[in-house]
Image: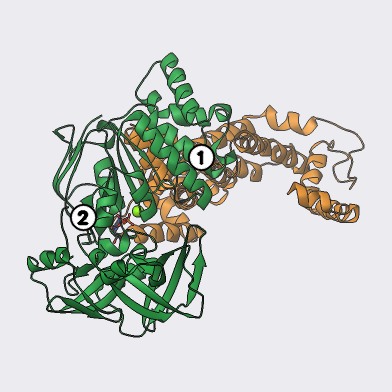
């Protein structure tokens, strides 16, 4: 067990591509850190540099206080779980899990005991003599985990370990990965492109974009206080709504109508040197059916009326989708997010809005609805830099 | 497959069985004819009977009675085994590098090696003859082993690199992470997975060396290094008027045996689909 420190670590591939740029990250002993971002943002490269599978072009990597840039993977004492599992097909489950111990020249009795323990934890005891090709996806995944945990390494590295499982199994395995990590208390770096996994698994989440770290923080903190448009749009499902807006002495003008900013937001803006044209971001849960609120609540927020495109009732609450006429919020970050979600080629006429209303709402598909939103929860972004103008540490 | 088999009608099965039988008989008939010839006595050799009227081991006794054949057999086995071993070892290393590494001129290397394999061997015979004469390699084992390796190596590299490409790269990374040195990763993970490819290649190369006639007849002159295919062509009857066909048939049967043994021995190791289950698929 050890802490892992990345000190201005960069990676330039031989073909000149700068895959990772000056990553600064301190991972405490026993911490569960998630690297998240759209595909191609340099997550795997970062993980491989920690593993020693890729050379570090610049910067320093320290494990347990020691510089390890020049050390071979085998001398770093860390285990890795691959997206493809990378099980040795010619070995049985038992031999697969015992392989790291055999290489470390551990005596037979200990190997036997450790493999048995790991198999017990991972519920693989009855499959020990089978070959990987005869196992289901979930079982293979567990063997890969088993191979990592048998030798009690300093740290675990996992590169999208659940992405090859079907949705249901993924949720199930997510819980067991989390439980296993708590149980073993081993420092873990986990790579995923799935923001749900990032939100649910980690102690801290590192959001990356194009090889650059965007923000590091606890999942809830990133959700509540995204540093920029990219983090705001990436974290959360359904994602934050973005609407172009104009700031005019204390009030905000947009297709959602004019609304007065609360004191809290205004104070934050004052220190931020905000431009006139901004992008307003509101999470779906900060909308409500105006018919359900009393006058005092209504007075403290913004309001708009529009026709409900689609209404999805989830039982506990209702999702109402709207399309408002107007220009979509435009920024490089949002474009990239749309591309990653595969929605960049969906013809977008107007601004689409997702709102989460309480289940008591009487909104009807196709009919007009009167919607309120909480102006205190509004986040404002600079369209040119993507910076969150209302960012605060608290 | 089992499900499909179960659904097949008896008629279909009979049809397939017949077709298989035809193919097998067509392929094996000349072989059986040779075997039959080899067991005929010199008197009944030309009688045209498929099953010998009187069985005799006369021909086998004949070929083993002189050193002409036994010496050639030893030469053939020795030369083919050595050439195969060297070609497979170097082929494995080269193919591994080609499959795994990106180095300048890689495609050129593969192209050139294929070009060598396609080069008409007959055009190389006279230059080789001259070279080996001046180097003192003419009519020696190395004199045959070297050209065999030259032509077997491209074949080996080509077959083996196809096998290596099938082995997921990540297995090697996984081995490294599990604490293996590059050598250990190769020996304990890559080599066992490449084994079917290595054995297949070994069989192909061995057969190529074993059957070669062109180089063997041009680059040898005495029993000292003459291989079996050449020795066969020098067979004569014990008298000028005797037909050597019986002896040739017996020798042909004998030289087929090592190949069959070689294939059977290695075939058990050629397990198809050994890499399945390594990665998600
Ligand atoms: N071996 C390589 N050579 C050159 N470029 C690479 C190599 N591997 C990855 N890259 C590039 O580096 C960037 C980051 O890749 P990667 O770390 O695999 O992303 P992620 O895991 O986040 O999807 C990508 O733009 C990719 O094209
Ligand atoms: Mg990746």
Residue B206 lies, in percent from the top left, at 55, 42
Residue to which mark 2 is pinned: A215
Relative depth, front residue between A253 and A6: A253
Q: Is residue A172 visible?
A: yes
Neighbor class of circle 1 (other Cα within 10 Å; few <14, some 14-19, many 20+) is many
Q: Which of the chains is green? A: A
| Residue A140 disc label | 1
Looking at the image, which residue is at 58% across and 49% down? B213
Neighbor class of circle 2 (other Cα within 10 Å; few <14, some 14-19, many 20+) is some
Chain letter of mark 1 equals A
Indicate whether A335 appears above or below B193.
below
How many badges with numbers are in the image? 2
Chain B: drawing colour: orange
Q: In what element is the residue under mark 1?
A: helix
Q: In what element is the residue under mark 2?
A: strand
Ligand 1's image quarter is: bottom left
Looking at the image, which residue is at 30% across and 82% down? A255
Chain letter of mark 2 equals A
**In this image, B44 relative to B180: left or right?**
right
The disc, 2 or 1, on the residue closer to the chain's N-terminal end is: 1
Colouring: by chain
Q: Is residue A336 visible?
A: no
Disc 2 residue lies near ligand 1 with CB under 8 A: no
Residue A239 lies, in percent from the top left, at 35, 64
Indicate whether B69 appears above or below B2.
above
């Amino acid at each position: 067990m050890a802490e892992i420190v990345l000190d201005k670590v960069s990676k330039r591939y031989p073909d000149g591509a700068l895959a990772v740029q000056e990553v600064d990250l301190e991972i405490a002993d026993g911490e569960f850190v998630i690297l998240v971002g759209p595909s191609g943002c340099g997550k795997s490269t970062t993980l491989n540099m920690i593993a020693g599978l890729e050379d570090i072009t610049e910067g320093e990597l320290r494990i347990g206080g020691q510089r390890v840039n020049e050390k071979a993977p085998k001398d770093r004492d860390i285990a890795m779980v691959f997206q493809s599992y990378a099980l040795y097909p010619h070995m049985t489950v038992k031999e697969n899990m015992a392989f790291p111990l055999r290489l470390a020249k551990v005596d037979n009795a200990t190997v036997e005991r450790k493999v048995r323990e790991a198999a017990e934890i991972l519920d693989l005891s009855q499959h020990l003599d089978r070959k990987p090709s005869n196992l289901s996806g979930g079982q293979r995944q567990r063997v890969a985990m088993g191979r990592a945990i048998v030798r009690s390494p300093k740290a675990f590295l996992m590169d999208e370990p659940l992405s090859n499982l079907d949705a249901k199994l993924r949720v199930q395995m997510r819980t067991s990965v989390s439980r296993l990590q708590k149980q073993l208390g081993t420092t873990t770096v986990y790579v995923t492109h799935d923001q749900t996994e990032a939100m649910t698994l980690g102690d801290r989440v590192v959001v990356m974009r194009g090889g650059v770290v965007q923000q590091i923080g606890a999942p809830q903190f990133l959700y509540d206080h995204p540093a920029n448009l990219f983090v705001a749009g990436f974290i959360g499902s359904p994602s934050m709504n973005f609407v172009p807006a104009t700031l005019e002495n204390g009030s905000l003008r947009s297709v959602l109508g004019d609304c007065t900013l609360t004191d809290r937001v205004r104070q934050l803006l004052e220190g931020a040197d905000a431009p006139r044209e901004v992008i307003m971001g509101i999470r779906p849960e900060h909308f409500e059916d105006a018919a359900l609120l009393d006058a005092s609540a209504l007075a403290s927020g913004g309001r708009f009326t529009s026709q409900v495109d689609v209404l999805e009732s989830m039982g506990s609450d209702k999702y109402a989708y709207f399309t408002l006429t107007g220009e979509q919020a435009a920024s490089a970050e949002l474009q990239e997010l749309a591309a990653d979600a595969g929605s960049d080629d969906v013809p977008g006429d107007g601004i689409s809005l997702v709102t989460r209303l309480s289940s008591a709402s009487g909104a009807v598909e196709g009919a007009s609805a009167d919607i309120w939103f909480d102006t205190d929860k509004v986040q404002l972004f600079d369209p040119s830099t993507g910076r969150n103008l209302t960012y605060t540490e608290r | 497959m089992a499900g499909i088999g179960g659904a097949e009608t008896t008629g279909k099965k009979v049809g397939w069985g017949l077709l298989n039988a035809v193919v097998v008989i067509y392929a094996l008939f000349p072989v059986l004819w040779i075997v039959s010839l080899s067991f005929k006595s010199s008197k009944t050799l030309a009688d045209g009977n498929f099953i010998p009227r009187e069985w005799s081991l006369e021909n086998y006794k004949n070929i083993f009675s002189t050193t002409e054949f036994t010496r050639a057999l030893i030469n053939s086995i020795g030369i083919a085994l050595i050439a195969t071993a060297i070609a497979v070892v170097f082929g494995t290393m080269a193919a591994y590098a080609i499959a795994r590494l990106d180095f300048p001129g890689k495609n050129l290397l593969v192209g050139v090696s294929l070009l060598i394999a396609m080069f008409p061997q007959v055009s190389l015979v006279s230059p080789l003859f001259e070279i080996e004469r001046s180097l003192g390699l003419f009519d020696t084992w190395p004199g045959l082993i070297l050209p065999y390796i030259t032509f077997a190596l491209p074949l080996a590299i080509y077959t083996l690199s196809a096998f290596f490409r099938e082995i997921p790269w990540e297995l090697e990374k996984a081995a490294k992470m599990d604490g293996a040195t590059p050598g250990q990763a190769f020996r304990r993970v890559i080599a066992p997975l490449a084994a079917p490819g290595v054995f297949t290649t070994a069989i192909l190369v061995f057969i190529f060396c074993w059957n070669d006639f062109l180089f063997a007849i041009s680059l040898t002159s005495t029993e000292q290094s003459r291989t079996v295919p050449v020795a066969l062509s020098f067979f004569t009857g014990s008298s000028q008027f005797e037909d050597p066909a019986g002896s040739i048939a017996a020798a042909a049967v004998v030289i087929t045996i090592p190949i069959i043994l070689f294939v059977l021995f290695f075939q058990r190791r050629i397990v198809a689909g050994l890499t399945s289950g390594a990665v998600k698929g």
